[in-house]
Structure formats: C-alpha cells, structure tokens
Amino acid sequence: MNKNVAIIGAGFSGAVIANQLAKAGYQVEVFESRSHVAGNCHSERDKETDVMVHVYGPHIFHTDNERVWAFVNEFGKFNSYTNRVKAITNGRVYTLPINLLTINQFFGKTFRPAEAQEFLASLGDKTIENPLTFEDQALRFVGRELYEAFFKTYTVKQWGLEPTQLPASILKRLPVRFNYDDNYFSHKYQGMPADGYTSIVEKMLDVPGVTVHLNTVFDPALKGDYAHVFYSGPIDAWFNHQEGRLPYRTLDFEVLRETGDYQGNAVINYCDNAQPYTRITEHKHFSPWEKHEGTVCYVEYSRQCTEKDIPYYPIRLANDKVQLERYLQLAQNETNVTFVGRLGTYRYLDMDVTIGEALDAAEKFLACASENSPMPAFVVNPLG
C-alpha cells in the first residue's frame, strides 16, 4: 500500500493535515512555494526593533471550538489577548464594533441599552425586508448615518466595490452591541501565541514522517506518485486558470518604524476618504506582555490581486458563481486530490475554522483509507 502523501502549502491547513497523517504512519511531503512556513500567518522578529511582526497582516486567534483550542495549545503557549479596534471617521475616534459607547459618542447621547436599541431601530430602513446586499443590510439594521460613517467608504477601500455589489453576508460578520463591551470578538477562547504563529506551525511539522520542501512549486502532473494530494493553494491555479482567474483582493503594506508608541492601539481603521489606506496596525500591541522601545506599524492598502500578487480574500460575488462552479466540477472530477483551506475552497475562513476543517480532512482520509474508499475532493461543500 502506498503511504506517501503530498501536501501543497505549509499554512495551517497543510501543517495540521501533515501532523495528523504522519502520526498515523504516513510519509508526508509538504511543498511550499515560499521561503517559510505558516502561509499568511507567518510571523517573525523585526531585526531593528525585535517586535514580533505579523508579516502578512495581523491575525488574532479566536474560537468557540474547544477541540481546535486544545489542539493549537499542544504546539505552544497562547497568551490572553483581546482585540480592541478603534475607528477614525470625520475627524473623530470611535470604538468598534459599534456598541453603546459608539452610539452615544456619535449621536451625542447618554442612552441606556434599551434606549439605544429603540433609537437604532428607529433609524433602520424598514422597507428593506430581505437585505440582499451589504448596503441593504447596513441600512436595514443601523441606518444611513452610521452606515456612511463607518462602513460605506471603508468597504469601497477594502473591496474595491460599491456596497451595493457585495452580498449582505459580509456585514453579518460585524456585530452591534448595546453595552460597553469593546472586545471585537465574542468567542470563548481568544489569544495570541507567545512565540508567534510560525513557531506553532513549525512544531506541527516537526514530527517523524514529515519532509518540508521550501521554495518549491508542486507540479500537478506528479500527483500520481502519491496515494493522495491535499492542495491548499488557489483552486484555479491547480487547473492552470483554464476557466479564467477567480477574483481575489490582495494587500500592500507601508512599514513605519518609530520610537515609543505610535498610535496607542493595535488596530485603527480609517473609515472615510481622508486617507487612502484602510487601517494602521501597530504590531507591538499584539504582544502586550513584551516591552520594546521601538515600534513597527503597517499602513494597509487593499487592491485587486494580479497574477504576481499574494491572494488574501476571495471576493465571491454572485456573478462569479458560475465560474466557481466550473472549477468545483473540475475538482470533483479529479482523483486522489482534496482541496482544503481558504484558497483551495475559495471561501473566507478564520484560522480556527481552517484548523477544524483540516482536522476533519485528516480524519476523513484515515477513515477512507481504512475502508479502501475514495477520499472526496471537498470535505466541506464550498457552496454550502
């Protein structure tokens, strides 16, 4: 029996699957096109300041999944971390997500929770019964003033599209609270790895049976050399973009190094057109247990991804569904290949979901192998 498995990509999806299959006795080869592991979660010490920098933009771990939380803690210590985001719009600083403080600051009120809830409900557009677009969703639930101050322009800068072109599901990720809770997330477990994400991934891959090939692009023509291939790269790239390139957003970063404290907070969003960038992140605040005299900030710009860029966010517009479905059909017709992760399934996934699905994929593969049955192209339906 061939017990050789190839994994394309050394991010969380690939590392988790490699770890689990190697522990089950498989010989796993991981192929990574970049010079490092951990994908877009890669972190490293800044040479000038010694600040732990999230090289491809910040990642905060948050989950309600106890299995995932227990799993990642096997590979390193996670320190408690709460993400408290600030937003600048119309020359003033507010707290995100929109909460009781934001509402009272913005409207110059002193509402109690029930009063704020009633007030916000009065601002919503009740004629929009079934919100289909991002704009519909915002107007229905927070009204035009908050929508235009915090969401409309920021969305155009982030996605390069008008909010009327984006699905309502994007805004459903953003909560509105009627108390003074300014924790950006509401999950049970929230934290930051004390030694960075790359250390976590390196330890996942540091098990007998795993070989990592950095700076190596895998040729799909070699898939027959392996019992199975797990692919976490862009699904359209696996098929040489034969149905055209799926649309992604990418990010550019302007790096600032200063002394002291640059902005007093890890994340500040810029929600209007006064600045062309979407946000500034100050990375030493992601490790508040450390002390540094210097500081490193990323000024973040979002734009359309080209073939030479690193893809960050799948856009998934309604008119792209036909193109995506063609790729999904091509994937279903493949043999001994499973597509995983954000890029492999063309979905926006948080880290905990990525890890959970990777654990499920490894478990499914081992079950299929024991039953001598084929492994599916997708463990989770990308359109589900």
Image (cartoon, grey):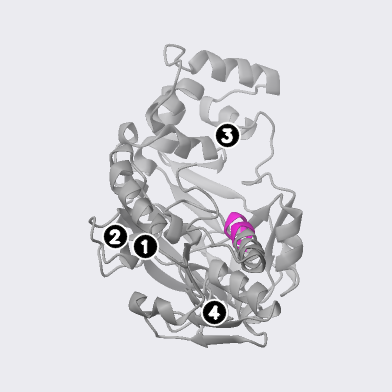
Mark 3 element type: helix
Tell which circle, 3 or 2, labels the residue nearer the N-terminal end.
3
Which residue has dot 4 on it? Answer: 44
Q: Image check: 2 left or right of 277?
A: right
| Comes first in the chain, label 1 or label 4 | 4
Q: Position of residue 71 (x, y in %)?
A: 73, 66
Question: Is 232 or 74 nearer to us in this picture?
Answer: 232
- Of badges 4 and 3, nearer the viewer stands 4
- Mark 1, other Cα within 10 Å: few <14 / some 14–19 / many ≥20: some
Look at the numbered disc 1 and give the secondary structure of its residue: loop
User: Are the residues flagged by discs 2 and 4 in contact, CB closer than 8 Å?
Assistant: no
**Quick check: marks 2 and 1 in contact, CB under 8 Å?**
yes
Reading the image, the residue beneath label 1 is 311
Distance (Cα) linking label 2 and label 1: 6 Å
Q: Which percent across, then down, holds residue 44? A: 54, 79
Q: Which mark's residue is nearer the viewer, 3 or 1?
A: 1
The residue tagged 3 is 102
Kindly report the distance in space between the C-alpha atoms of the residues bearing marks 3 and 2: 33 Å
Numbered label attached to residue 305: 2
Which tag is nearer the camera, tag 1 or tag 4? 1
Looking at marks 2 and 4 on the same chain, the residue that comes earlier in the sequence is marked by 4
In magenta stretch: residue 355:
yes
Q: Quadrant of residue 182?
A: top right
The location of residue 156, given as percent across then percent down, is: 32, 42
Residue at coordinates 44% horizontally, 37% vertically from top-left? 150
Q: Is residue 185 visible?
A: yes
| Residues shaded magenta | 352-358
Q: Three-letter amino acid code at disc 4?
A: Glu
